[in-house]
Amino acid sequence: MAAAPSGPPAEPHYLPPSVQGAVKILVTGPFGVGKTTLVGSLSEITPLRTEETMTAASAGVDDLTGRSGKTTTTVALDFGRITLNRRLALYLFGTPGQQRFWPLWDDLSRGALGAIAMVDLRRPDESFDVLGRLEEQQIPFAVAVNTFPDSPSYPEEEIRAALDLLPGAPVLYCDARDRRAAYDLLIDFVDHLHRTAVLELER
């Protein structure tokens, strides 16, 4: 796998001609969990974002409790790319978090090899619907606990019980703002897909 990016992506950044395959990965989770931030931290290109400024029309619809600094929301998708090795590229599709955008979520999930399901331990109950949809669609996923500064800490077995996770779903941790931590998360997730024979990595 390529070395972790050390700084912001240089432009233009084209795929090398040796790349022969592409893998689609969802980055999903509830509203305000850090999906856009994670895609931005991972992408080797400037990510495509469809964020809009939140207005008074969202009052009473989008719960901003504990998210006082959040002023924008994804209304379609986030898109990023990272080259795994000389033959394989990974495309990241960040989904909207609110239920009113779920018809689009269904479209984005088609063809996905796996999903990184982000969770905020300050409000784990908000993740139930997304995790349930991943299980219904039989998309392999890992839970990625985004460690906010005021996040509580729980043993993994308690997190698994609280989220009612199946035994095969890994629980990973990262600070989505940290490029190195985000890359380590991706390495662990790709390794999980490889070990479970979902993804074949060519060297």
Image: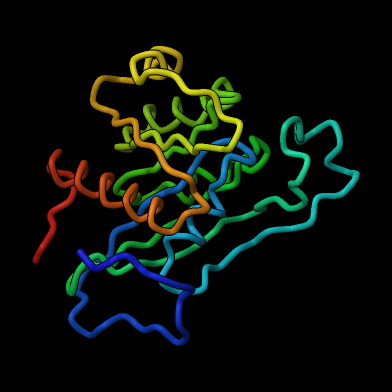
Residue drawn at 53 percent across, 26 percent down: 121
Q: Is residue 26 left or right of residue 119?
A: left
Residue drawn at 40 percent across, 15 percent down: 164
Q: Position of residue 163 (x, y in %)?
A: 44, 19
Residue drawn at 88 percent across, 43 percent down: 57
Q: Is residue 130 left or right of residue 82?
A: right
Q: Residue furthest left?
A: 203
Look at the picture and state if 91 lies above or below 153: below
Based on the displayed image, in which of its 4 quarters is residue 20 positioned?
A: bottom left
Look at the picture and state if 43 lies above or below 188: below
Q: Position of residue 114 (x, y in %)?
A: 32, 44
Quadrant of the image for the N terminus?
bottom left
Q: Residue furthest right?
A: 56
Q: Is residue 89 left or right of residue 70?
A: left
Quadrant of the image for the C terminus?
bottom left
Residue drawn at 50 percent across, 33 percent down: 119
Based on the displayed image, in which of its 4 quarters is residue 154 positioned?
A: top left
Based on the displayed image, in which of its 4 quarters is residue 151 positioned?
A: top right
Q: Position of residue 16 (x, y in %)?
A: 26, 83
In this view, the residue in front, 203 or 79, is 203
